[in-house]
Image (cartoon, grey):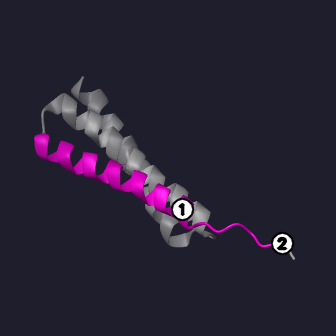
Amino acid sequence: MADFLFAAAAFVLLVVAAGLIRILRGPGDAERMMAAQLLGSGGIAALLLSASNGATAVTDVALILALLAAFASIMFVKGARPARRP
């Protein structure tokens, strides 16, 4: 079981690294926001992995990361302005 959890953690780390690259090189704001959501999903995955190992500090950090990603997407949607028609 420990090997599976290590492989899952490595996969989550790779996905989060890909999200960080997309945030830095993303062509538009929407792509960057989706990459930030990916980081939030990585936080939730870290939460599930840490809950199986009993690490409470990592669980707290993962919960905060997921919460911040949700609030960031809400603010992104609220800040989007509709296109003006001539």
Side of 10 relative to 55 (left or right): right
Q: 10 above or below 86? A: above
Query: Is residue 64 part of the magenta span, yes or no?
Result: yes
Sequence-first tag of 2 and 1: 1
Where does residue 43 sit, x and y in percent of width and height?
A: 33, 47
The one nearer the camera, 40 or 3, is: 40
Where does residue 9 sit, x and y in percent of width and height?
A: 31, 40
Q: Which residue is mark 1?
A: 78
Callout 1 amino acid: Lys
Q: Quadrant of residue 77?
A: bottom right
Q: Residue at x 49, y 71 (%)?
A: 24
Query: Is residue 17 part of the magenta span, yes or no?
Result: no
The majority secondary structure of the magenta stretch comes to: helix
Q: 80 above or below 46? A: below
Where does residue 68 sit, x and y in percent of width and height?
A: 35, 56
Q: Is residue 18 visible?
A: no
Q: CA distance from mark 2 to mark 1?
A: 20 Å
Q: Residues within 10 Å of mark 2 (few under 14, many from 20)?
A: few
Side of 51 relative to 70 (left or right): left
* Figure quadrant of the N terminus: top left
Q: Which residue is mark 2?
A: 85
Where does residue 83 sit, x and y in percent of width and height?
A: 75, 69
Q: Residue at x 12, y 40 (%)?
A: 56
The stretch in magenta equals: 56-85
Callout 2 amino acid: Arg
Q: Is disc 2 placed on a helix, strand or loop? A: loop
Q: Is disc 1 placed on a helix, strand or loop? A: helix
Q: Residue furthest bottom?
A: 86
